[in-house]
Amino acid sequence: MSWRATVLTLFPEMFPGPLGQSLAGRALERGLWSLQTEDIRAAATDRHGTVDDTPFGGGAGMVMRPDIVAAALAGVTDDRPAVFLTPRGRPLTQATVHRLAAGPGIVLLCGRYEGVDQRVIEAAGLEEISVGDYVLSGGEPAAIVLLDACVRLLPGVMGAAASAEDESFSAGLLEYPHYTRPAEWQGRRVPEVLLSGHHAAVAAWRRAEAERITRERRPDLWAAYLVATAGASVATATRAP
Ligand code: ADE
């Protein structure tokens, strides 16, 4: 059975969206994964299709009712992990993406950002995941991000070259810069070492560039990398910032 994604949302028409195109879209057509959407509003019990209510304790915004969300989840949950997309969640990492892609699939709950009643998150054992430290208007774009990251790792979706590239991020460094023809463009030359045909020198340059850029842009990743590679040779570790 191929990897199965089910998305619970108030906006099913947002899917597949970008996931119907390019790599993920071709993989969908080829049956390497499947995507099912469930309209949360279908679980509403009144004739207005009410899914939310005002927060206990007061305050702005509306909160999704636990009974409605539980009923929507009950129809789709099986052995797959169930995730609630929220800026309050643990940050999504490539390690999490690998874990989720290695399983049978995923159930994603897209809520309104003001909130979902905490009791149903606990009762259903939902894993809370954030795609970054910013606030989206809903969980749907976050679900698309998470699904895209998982689908590209599924067997048969990518060629060997791209999976090797993923390994380089998993190693804890940002990627080195890329260049192609022409060798000179608008007075800017490609770094000479890349034209040298000297494979070891190219590899050393790329590693040094990956380390430099990680150190400059992501002190958090750089610190973790230094710990992980303690004792091993780090090309630029001792160089002043
Ligand atoms: N919903 C709103 N903002 C989000 C975020 N940053 N990550 C995941 N889900 C969200």
Image (tube, grey):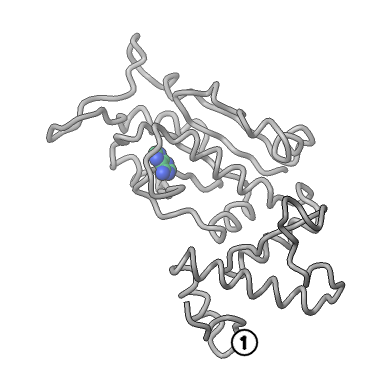
Q: Residue at x 19, y 30 (%)?
A: 60
Say which amino acid is labelled 1.
Ser
In the rendered structure, the answer to whether residue 62 lies left or right of residue 24 reads left
Q: Is residue 84 visible?
A: no
- Neighbour tally class for label 1: few under 14, some 14-19, many 20 plus, Cα within 10 Å: few
- Residue 70 placement (x, y as % from top left): 38, 33
For this orientation, the residue located farthest to the bottom is 231
> Ligand 1, what quadrant?
top left
Q: Is residue 199 above or below residue 134?
A: below
Q: Is mark 1 within 8 Å of ligand 1?
A: no
State left or right for residue 155 relative to residue 16.
right
Q: Is residue 131 visible?
A: yes
Viewer-closest of 76 and 239: 239
- The picture quadrant where one finds residue 174 is bottom right
Residue 84 falls in image quadrant: top left
Looking at the rendered structure, the secondary structure element under dot 1 is loop
Pinpoint residue 41: horizontal percent, then vertical percent. Answer: 42, 20
- Residue 84's place in the image compared with 68, above or below, is below
Hey, which residue is sitting farthest front in the picture? 187
- Which residue position holds label 1? 233
In the image, farthest residue toward the top: 47
